[in-house]
Image: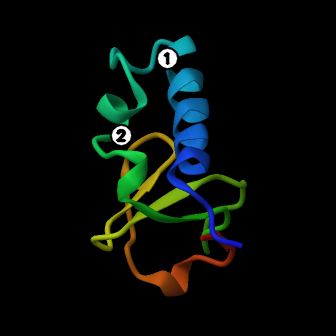
């Protein structure tokens, strides 16, 4: 199954709103918070080696990876277990 940018944007909205409600960002939109658009996302990873809690990592089409808090993360695919794409 191929996921669409609207699904990726749904995850972006979820994590942006979570951070906004906790006053962890002053951004006005998910795109401003993350620094990319849903159309830039290639896949989402939900597990990363060395991280004990579940999360979300957005892998962009250019190879960069960002976590659900918009922090850059390790781009090497071998660190990630589960993806949606």
Q: Residue 50 vs residue 69: left or right?
A: right
Q: Position of residue 56 (x, y in %)?
A: 60, 54
Q: Position of residue 19 (x, y in %)?
A: 52, 24
Residue named by callout 1: 20
SS label for mark 2 = helix
Q: Position of residue 26 (x, y in %)?
A: 34, 14
Classify 10 Å Cα crowding around label 1: few (below 14), some (14-19), many (20 and above). some
Residue named by callout 2: 34
Q: Position of residue 57 (x, y in %)?
A: 52, 58
Residue in the image at 61% along x and 32% along y: 14
The image quadrant that residue 30 belongs to is top left
Residue 6 or 79: which is nearer the viewer?
6
What separation in Å lies between label 2 and label 1 (alpha carbons)? 12 Å
Residue in the image at 35% along x and 57% along y: 40
Residue in the image at 60% along x and 70% along y: 85
- Quick check: 39 above or below 16? below
Quadrant where the N terminus sits is: bottom right
Q: Residue 23 vs residue 34: left or right?
A: right
């Amino acid at each position: 199954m191929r996921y669409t940018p609207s699904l990726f944007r749904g995850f972006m909205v979820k994590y942006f709103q979570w951070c906004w409600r906790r006053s962890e960002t002053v951004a006005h939109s998910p795109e401003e918070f993350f620094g990319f658009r849903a159309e830039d996302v290639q896949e989402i990873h939900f597990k990363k080696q060395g991280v004990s809690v579940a999360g979300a990592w957005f892998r962009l089409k250019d190879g960069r990876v960002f976590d659900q808090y918009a922090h850059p993360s390790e781009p090497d695919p071998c660190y990630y277990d589960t993806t949606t794409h």
